Each structure stands twice: as C-alpha cells, then as structure tokens.
Image: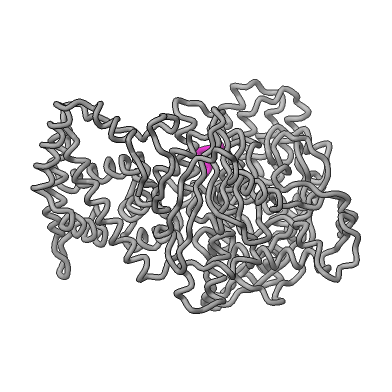
Amino acid sequence: MTVRVSAVAATQARAGTASKSAVTWQTKCVAERNDATSIARDLTDCRQRGLDWLDHTTKYQAPVPATALQQLAADYVAARGLVATERIDQIKLLLRHGIEHYLQQGHVAEATLVRDLFFGGSMDGAIPQPSVLLKSANTFQEPEARFRQRRAQTMQSFAKFLIGFVASTNPEPVPRVDLPDLHDNNYDIYKTRYADDSERFVHLLATASKVTIVGFTNERLLPLLREALSRKRANGRTEVFWDSLRIVFLGNDLLAGVNDEREDINDPVEQLRQRSQASFWAYKSIGAFLKRTRSARWALYKCPYIPALTGSLFEFDDHKKIVHVVIRRARKPFAENVYIELEDHAEQFSVVFEDIVKYSANNYNVPVGTPAGAVFQCRQRRLHLSVLKDGSRAHGWLPMVLVVMTRRRDRRIEPILQFRTQENSARELNRLSHLGGHILQEDCEQPGDQQATGRWFFGLTDQIPVRAAARLVAEIAAIDPAGALRPRATGSYLYPDKENLFFFIFSLELQEGAQFPRQAEMHAFPLPELLSIRANQVLRSAADLCRAPVASSRIWRAAAGIVALNLSLHGHDDLGGVLVGLADQPVAARSRVAGQISDLVAEQATPGWALGDNEFRLTGLAGWQYREFFRVLLPLYARINVDGAVDLDREMRADRAKSAAIDHLHELYQNEDLISQMPIEL
C-alpha cells in the first residue's frame, strides 16, 4: 500500500517499449501453458519423495509424475541451452537457479525455506532424506499445523515466481526494474507494507551507513543481516561495515507480556519457553555472526522496559533518515504485521530510538580477576564483547562454568557434548565441548548477596558458579536442572595472547529421552569415539607443528615435547620420538614427516545426525577439555559411570609411562612462560 510510487513508474517507462513487449509476450505464453497451482502441487510431491528418488519404484511406490514442473524445467533448460537430458537433473537445475534468483530478489525467508526443504543447508553435495530435510527446515520449531500452512503458502508463491523466472529466460536482454532510488526527488517515502517485505528491508539495511533495530526477539533477523552485509561487501570489499549497527532485544523478564502467534498455544509456560528460546538463540547467533565480521562498530542491547516503538532507523551518508515503525497485530505471525515507512525530517522518531538505546543494557559484563587455589577473586568487570580477542594481549582471568551432561540409554551412560557451529558459538568452531560459558555479572549480583559489587570471590560450591551453570543449561539445553547439578572440580587454561580461563566444573545426569533445541547441537558421543577424536586431533597438531615456521631449536623441542607426550597417551610413542628429533632438521625434512603424519589421520565418519557432507567437519575437542581429558575428564566420567570409563581410567593410571605423561603434561600446560612461546595451539 503506497501513497505514490512515481519512481517505479518512471523507471518502467525508461525500460524500452520493444524489449518490454517481447518479455510481456513470452511471459504470457509461459503463463498460459503453466498453472501455478499445479506446479505448487508438483513441488510438494517432489519434496515429499525427495529429488533423488522421484523415479524410485517399489511395491508401494510409483514414480512421481510432476508433469507441470517437469515441463517448466524442460522449458528452462531449452531456453538457457543447458546440458541436462534427465528430468531429475532438469528439475534440480531449475530449482537451484530459481532459489538463487528468489534470494537475490530479497525473498530471503522464503528462498531459505525452499532450499532447506529440497536440498538442505547447501545446494551442493548429497541430498538428505526428505524426513531429515523437513525436520531441519522447521527452524523456529513451529507447531506442525502452522508449519504445514507456511510450507503450502511458500510453495504457491515460489511456483508463481518460477513461471515468471522461466518466462524471462530468453536470448534478449531482460530490462531490469531496480528498486526506487531512496534519494530520488520523485519518490514518496511515506508508505505502509507488510513486515515480511524482506527485500525492502534488506535494501535499506545494505545501503544505510548507520542502523538501529528495536525488536522483541529478533528471531528472523540473522539471514537478513547476512544478506545485507553480503551486498555491502560486494566486489571483495571485505572491510566494509556499517558505521554503527545497534540491535535492541526485549529484556528476558518482559517476554511473557508479548502478544504474538504463540498465544494460540493457550499455555503461558510453553509460550514463554518458546519465546525465551527464540530470543536467546537470536541474540547468541547474531552476536556470533557479528563477532566474525571483525568489526567493533556494533552492539547488542537488552531493553528493561516495553519500548515506545519497535522497528528500524536507517541513516544515510547524506544525513537522510528513514524510519520503519512496526505495527503488531495481536496473536498474528510476524508476516501479518504491518510497518509504516517515512522520512524523519524533524528527527522526532530518531529521538525515540536514541532514548530506547540509552536506557537499554549494552551487551553484558563478565567478571575479571585471579584464581587463588580453588577460589576465584574478581577485581573488575569487562564487556563480554571485548574479551578473548585473538592477539589482544589482555591480562587477567575469566571465570567459566563447564557442565558435563550425561544421559542413560539402554542401561549405559553416555556423555552429551555440543558440536560448536557458527550458530551457537563464536570460538572453537567445529569442535566438541561439554556445555560451557562465562560467569556473568548478573550471576554475581542477586538479591541478598552480601559481597560488594565488583569484588566477588567464590568457590566451586558457592551460589555464583551454581547459578551460572543452571542458567547455561536452561538457556542452551532448554532444561531446568532443578538442583541436580553436582560440583566436581576446577581447572585452568592458559592462553598466550589473551585472557586465561578458570573453570568451575559440574556434572548433570539427564533423564532418558531428554531432548535439546536443534541449534544447541547436543549429541551423545561414546567414550571410544571421543578417544578416536582426540587421537586424530593430536596427529593433526603434530603435522601442524612440522609445517609451522619455528626458527628456534629450543622452542621446537619444547613444543615437540608436549605433542610427543600427547602422542604417547594414544600409543604413538615412536612417532613422538621422531618429532623431537626434528629440532635441528631442515624444513624439507619436517615437511616430509608432516605428510607421513597426515596419512595417519583417520577422518571421523559423519555421524547420523549430520545433515550433509559440506556442513560437518569435526576437528577435535575444545581447548581445556583436550588438554585435561585424561587428568580430569576421564576420572570424572569414571565417577559418574560413563560406559567404559572405569576400566580405561584404571588402565591409564596403571601404566607408569602414561600416568607420568598425564601429570607432566598438566605441569607444562600450567607454565605461562612456556605456553606463551608455543608456535601453534597445543
């Protein structure tokens, strides 16, 4: 709904009458030959069977006809002059190219859903089973009825798009109708649109220099941010970023008062749980994404009150400001909300946005201090955003919690670890870790606590680490530990170039059948599989060391000694000796050994929960858990009866050489001077 769109009309008038007529004629022919409803029906049938199985014939299954979709795909292949004779290949080509163009036109959510339903997270490589695709495509964990309705609507709109997409595929250049120029004097900014008009939002986001976004959960924002930044960084301009990007979330305590489509559940507890999970994962994944941009010109906020408005403020280099004010409809999904777009000449709305940001909490603080034995003494606070930056040379220790979760299955107890991805982590990606995270200022400041603000001290059994561990389990695993956390140990991890970490370690046994949010990537790993993963990680470290440019023989011997001790724990004593002997050898000799070691690495087989070959590359265990696996984790596994842990721990301690290696490694890993000189992470 617009007041005036004269710029669009003017742009179309400049397109050229002859070319436009040709396109109109071809579009009409394709439209007459194809019916969007039939193609949408074929898309659904193909999705249910799976693209690779359309011609599959069994006693209970006949090939999927998909007549209308097949004809459209054949038209597309013929018009483009592509080499694809089999109908499945033709349909795949049409869908891949169609999804890419659908995304480019700004239909980010719809294109992503279609891609996930037909191909998975990547359109390359093997296609998972339809049931796996369907489950993973339900990103927001919608109720089945609502998700089915959204799929049907998306298939219908995508079918209409495909017809026009194929119609426009011809040898003649197709006149492009660009979005109106925001600074065109003929363009009237004032308009209203539905909130799912993602192209308009992404265009403004990509062209603005400063952006402020105020939302409740912001659960649909991440793919739009990705697309906008991709457009900003077109032509290889990887350093480009907004001059300022501020994103405001509603405070956790206020999410119960939001009136969205989840109200239809008629269960306040479940409504709040879903809303809290959506907000948490949006906050975490957006933060992780923005950290990887290597820019410091962004901030995330939590608003402690219901904001006066929700929407976005876009500021441009010529000082023009455009505002989107979202009008939320009660119990309606996001797509049915409406926004008003206007130019803020008098900066009346800009002031409101500034007030919201001013009175919101900027990110969150973490305590910084020093450990004294098993007690941590906090002396100051730092923004979470500013800690653990590679090469920062920042001093101090950060208190952390680590929760070793296990689950009983078939009378066996298995450890549950998190596979760290770009969605759930900002560091140590593609590694396995028990649930871990920072102790925050909010964990330290609770009513009734007597310690002075900013001067906390606490041990393993005190309330501060217990609260942090309980919060972590509730946020990431969506499980209320309800007093089931058991304090187990403490541990420290030294970094050579940033703050060190001090861990408070807990255990938590889950009920059989406990489930986790998809984004958490929590999975069971039997002990033999964890041993294999660590063994391969040690071999990779050995090969990496051989390739590292280490000039000093002394440093090489020290690093090789650490790797050799780790190799001995996995039965590679001879290889460790070879490694130490390379200290005075030339680079060529080290390179040859690196190749020989790499041949010994057994790449981990893709687990059953992995969605595709291109989405999974497990590189090992997270830092502290790798270093202290045999000294702390394995005995803990034995204490909580992880299957096979008792026998393995007894075996390791009975072997004098391995027992000595475990203790010596711990001493080396606690030597700050030594760790600071290591050429690679060990």
User: What's the residue at 37%, 43% (across, down)?
Assistant: 106
The image shows residue 624 at horizontal and vertical percentages of: 71, 51
Drawn side of residue 390 relative to residue 148, left or right? right
The image shows residue 17 at horizontal and vertical percentages of: 16, 27
Whether the magenta-drawn stretch holds residue 599 is answered as: yes
Name the image quarter holding residue 407. bottom right
User: What's the residue at 37%, 34% (across, down)?
Assistant: 180
- Which is nearer the eye, 40 or 57? 40
The image shows residue 478 at horizontal and vertical percentages of: 58, 68
Count how many numbered circles sit on residues in the image.
0
Q: Does the magenta stretch mainly form a helix, a strand or a loop?
A: helix
User: What's the residue at 70%, 68% (across, down)?
Assistant: 470
Q: Is residue 434 visible?
A: yes
Q: Is residue 536 visible?
A: no
Drawn side of residue 596 relative to residue 665, left or right? left
- Which is nearer the eye, 323 or 367? 323
**The C terminus lies in quadrant:** top right
Name the image quarter holding residue 592. top right
Drawn side of residue 156 relative to residue 311, left or right? left
Indicate whether 159 appears above or below 274.
above
Whether the magenta-drawn stretch holds residue 203 is answered as: no
User: What's the residue at 54%, 28% (across, down)?
Assistant: 318
Indicate whether 331 appears above or below 355.
below
- Which is nearer the eye, 576 or 669? 669
Q: What is the magenta range?
A: 597-602
